[in-house]
Amino acid sequence: MRGMLLLITLLFSLNASANEVSIINASFKKDKGLWYVSVTLKHNDTGWDHYADAWRLLDANGKEIGKRVLFHPHEQEQPFTRSLGNVRINPSNKIIYVEAHDKVHGWSKQRLVVDLRKKQGAGFQVVK
């Protein structure tokens, strides 16, 4: 019985982590001192109770510098890209973190690291 409970718990946690939102890509474009950011997410949206509902940008100190709220599920559109304009990023900030959120799991364990000094990296592009 104890082994069965352990197995069920393990399968449930594997299933839960498999349904977290994934950050596929981020694109940062600077224009006149402000940034336009597009983020591509993938998530197994199942309806209004479980869907990817936001992404955000954090500086190296963990301060939120931008957030894009997603107001509906994207069940038929996966992966999907949504953008946020007029983002102010202090010029001293060289590293930005992108995090994604879904209604069941909260903020994902995955975090995309964007180095604004580079034109591109693993999962990101920067245009100045």
Image (cartoon, rainbow, N blue to C red):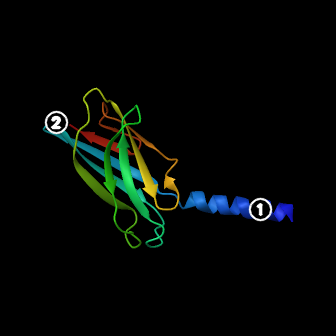
Q: Amino acid at mark 1?
A: Leu
Residue 103, image x, y percentages: 47, 61
- In the picture, measured across the screen, residue 28 lies left or right of residue 32, that is right
Q: Residue at x 36, y 55 (%)?
A: 40
Say which element carries label 1: helix
In the image, farthest residue toward the left: 32
Of residue 69 and residue 82, the one placed in the foreground of this image is 69
User: Nearer the N terminus, badge 1 or badge 2?
Assistant: 1
**Mark 1 sits on what residue?**
7
Callout 1 crowding tier (Cα within 10 Å): few <14, some 14–19, many ≥20: few
Quarter that holds the C terminus: top left
Say which element carries label 2: loop
Q: Residue at x 41, y 36 (%)?
A: 62
In the displayed structure, would residue 77 be above or below residue 100? Answer: below
Q: Give the quadrant of residue 60.
A: top left
Residue 109, image x, y percentages: 52, 47
Residue 53, image x, y percentages: 40, 60
Callout 2 crowding tier (Cα within 10 Å): few <14, some 14–19, many ≥20: few
**Mark 2 sits on what residue?**
33
Q: Give the quadrant of residue 1.
A: bottom right
Of residue 59 and residue 116, the one placed in the foreground of this image is 59
Residue 10, image x, y percentages: 71, 59
In the image, farthest residue toward the right: 1
Of residue 11 and residue 25, the one placed in the foreground of this image is 11
- In the picture, measured across the screen, residue 37 lies left or right of residue 13, that is left
In the displayed structure, would residue 80 be above or below residue 46? Answer: above
